[in-house]
Amino acid sequence: MNYLILGANAAGLSAAVRILKFDKNAKVTVLEKSDVVSFGSCGIPYYVGGEFSNIEQMTARPYQDFIQLGIDIKLQHEAIVLDANNKKVSCRQLVTNQTTDFYYDKLLIAVGASPSKPAINGFSTQNVMTMHSRYDAQNIVQVLPEVENIVVIGGGFIGVEAAEALRHRGKKVTLIEFAPRILNKTFDEQITALLEQELIHNGVNLRTDEAVTEIISNAGKVAHVATNKGSYPADLVIVATGFKPNTEFLKNSGIDLTAQGAIIIDNCCQSNIADIYAAGDCATVEHCILGNTFIPLATTANKLGRLAGEVMAGHQSQFIGTLGSSGIRVFNFEAGRTGITEADAKQSNIDYGIVFVEDKNHTDYVQPQTDIWVKLIYDKSSRVLLGGQICGAYLGGSVHRTDALAVAIYAGLTVDELGFMDFIYAPPFARTWDVLNIAGNVAK
């Protein structure tokens, strides 16, 4: 069987390895647009912030390992046309600019996503960068000694992490977010208010509900960022305004795409065309509560890549669904979320209830004791837990308590059952009634 995979990162290479496990006679070819494989971009903010210096630590598995497994990886090959009728992908070799056709029996599209940019002038100016690739990370670190004022555009995960990293480097940082609050698609207002306070407390000039109108240059180099409310000096601009699936080459292929350009797949990673599969940041994912949606997360890319490889090789596998579980550190705070937010519940017309409590992470006679906040979203009729968000001091147990909520949602537990769940009690870790017990019991 001839397997063709487009993309050599989390989803694509996870699939390649699983195909070889289940089909010993497989011929696996992987085409990668860049010259980098298996790179974990989630670590970039911590590299930029100086928490480690060896960029190779972000490579999950070296190129040579995959070659030794028998996977044929062709670097700097960009897919430009998919001919599904003839089971053929035409690719451009970026070094020679030659076009080559690759035929397949089964195809996996795992081309990922690229940073999106709002329609404003100035993105081609020197020192205006994104924070997505290995080269982005290296370029940012290279110019840091020469810059003082940095503007980060976008208050999502990457923008907030970038602001923290650059403040750790001693830079003057302005963070501009178009929406009224940061992380507005991930957390509800009770949590984002805490994180915004932490950003401001640590010297970030936070500007929410503000739109960038132009990036202004001086002698070809960035000088200011203009908004509808002011102008901010900038020696470096980091653009972190979301992602767009790399699926332009599929527009006339017959593959069903969302309005965002994500490939629509089922819970076996199958597209609407036979023998064509997709996984990772270029595809949708089945959310346990919200249905098919676009959530570009590394965890999902790895899982769906593994599952796609198994299904393509004839093994019966099916995705259990995602909850969009994710977490973030913001200076001395951490926050985690899973399931749906209150905003999701409203948009989905769910009759829901909420509870928001503040407590302590463990007993008061073991230091350092810190505050911890929990928000639960649940179905008002059945009282089944639908979502949860937790915030507290960094390393104070907030994010990993969110994992417990994820398991509870998968299991269909009610808030009443959460109230009496048998969580660990020991003075350094929790109170006799853990904050999750308290939240469950407070729910009306």
Image (cartoon, rainbow, N blue to C red):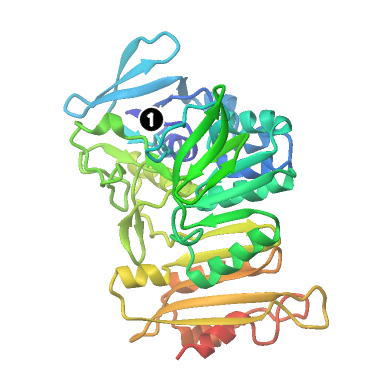
Q: Name the residue under label 1.
A: 6
Residue located at (32% from left, 46% from top): 269
Taking the image as drawn, is residue 38 in sight? no
Q: Is residue 130 above or below residue 189?
A: above
Residue located at (63% from left, 37% from top): 58
| In the displayed structure image, the side of residue 198 where residue 10 appears, left or right | left
Image quadrant occupied by the N terminus:
top left
Compare residues 37 and 295 and report the one nearer the observer. Answer: 295
Compare residues 57 and 148 and report the one nearer the observer. Answer: 148
Taking the image as drawn, is residue 210 in sight? yes
**Residue 362 appears at what percent x and percent y?**
73, 79
* Amino acid residing under circle 1: Leu
**Residue 343 appears at what percent x and percent y?**
38, 69
Q: Total of numbered circles in the picture?
A: 1
| Quarter residue 256 falls in | top left
| Quarter residue 377 falls in | bottom left
Image quadrant occupied by the C terminus:
bottom left
Is disc 1 surrounded by few (<14), some (14 to 19) or many (20+) residues within 10 Å?
A: many
**Residue 114 appears at what percent x and percent y?**
43, 36
